[in-house]
Amino acid sequence: MPPATDWKEVVPDGEAARFERYAEMFGAMQKRHAGEKDPARALHAKGNLGLEAELEVLPDLPEEARVVGLFGKPAKYRALVRYSNGAARRQHDRKPDVRGIAIKVLGVDGKKLIPGMTDATTQDFLAIRTPSVPMANADEFVTLVRAAETPALLPFKVLGKLGLRRGFRILKRALAGFKIPTMPLAATAYYSALPISYGPYAVHYAFMPVDTGAPSAGQEPHFLGAELAARLRVAPVVYDLKIQFYRDAEHTPIEDASVEWDGPWVTIARLTLPIQDPTSSRGVKVAAYVEQLAFDPWHAREDLRPLGNIMRARNHAYRASTMGRKALPEPTSLPEFD
């Protein structure tokens, strides 16, 4: 039986204007954190590592997984990967925080979503450590981000804005998601946590590590990137890219991002970070280039369009952040790093 196709988005009146105001807020926060320096990203400011990779679309996928052009037939694509901490400031890796991975796949055909970039040949995938987020929608997300600007007052601000019951629920889940890493980056699963279209279907996606690895015991400020760099000098890092199809509005909601989707995972591709030395001359150049790029869920083919309230808010916020820090344009090819 094919996956359900009766999913739908619910867009309330005035949403776009509200999301524009949120984007302006993030832009102001970005400038405030930068001070006299060039602005960093509004969120995920600290990059752990920027690396070279390859995405391989696997053969013999089920029919429902082949409806999207990128995954319609076996192929290999060059890619760039950025690991990051989620905070708006660059801080110690042992600070509680969101951890993320962003993948830019190159040489992807098809019309893209962002006006003025419809002929771009890149496709981005962004993911975090948790399969859902504490907040149901962008309004709750902005409340949490604003409160985090003054950490000592964060609980009181969240409870005051969202009420005791909802506020406590969000704070409890946020603390669970912000926990200090106990596994190295190479052995961590990363989830979209938010839906995208997949041709006529809707899906979540995830990058699942092939190797589990040993627990992390790092203490230095940048231990996450250092551990991954040490691993990549001697062995590749591999993830299976999997998708999870929409079932129904209760078990796999489009608009409520706080609900973890319930359903089987289907493997569609493999992401491989080959052996490389991030501290070499080439590795340093790759990392510097990756830091200047923009990674945006809306850098996507039309048949992989982001869905839901928070994704629609990101369409405004990411563009503002990209312009605020003067990110590089989307690449059509990679520079010579050697």
Image (cartoon, rainbow, N blue to C red):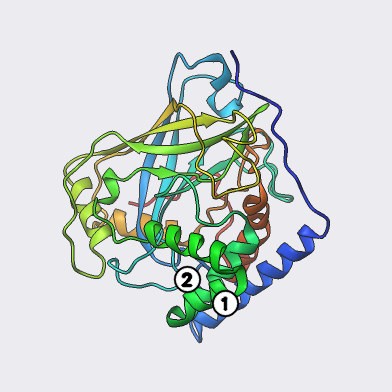
What is the x, y in percent for residue 243?
Answer: 49, 31
Residue 29 — which label?
1
- State the residue at coordinates (22%, 59%): 226
Q: Secondary structure at mark 1?
A: helix
The 10 Å Cα crowd at callout 2, few under 14, some 14 to 19, many 20 or more, is: many
Residue 273 — which label?
none
- State the residue at coordinates (66%, 55%): 315
Location of the N terminus (image quadrant): top right
Q: Residue furthest right?
A: 13
* Residue carrying label 2: 88
Residue 36 visible from this viewpoint: yes
Quadrant housing residue 93: bottom left
Task: Name above or below for residue 32 compared with residue 99.
Answer: below
Earlier in the chain: of badge 1 and badge 2, it is: 1
Q: Are marks 1 and 2 in contact (CB under 8 Å)?
A: yes
What is the x, y in percent for residue 244?
Answer: 51, 31
Residue 30 visible from this viewpoint: no
Q: Residue furthest bottom?
A: 36
In terms of depth relative to the viewer, which is nearer, 134 or 96? 134
What is the x, y in percent for residue 228?
Answer: 24, 52
In this rendering, the count of numbered labels is 2
Q: Amino acid at mark 1?
A: Met
Task: Name above or below for residue 64 compared with residue 286.
Answer: above
What is the x, y in percent for residue 333?
Answer: 51, 44
Distance of label 1 from label 2 (alpha carbons): 8 Å
In terms of depth relative to the viewer, which is nearer, 104 or 218? 218
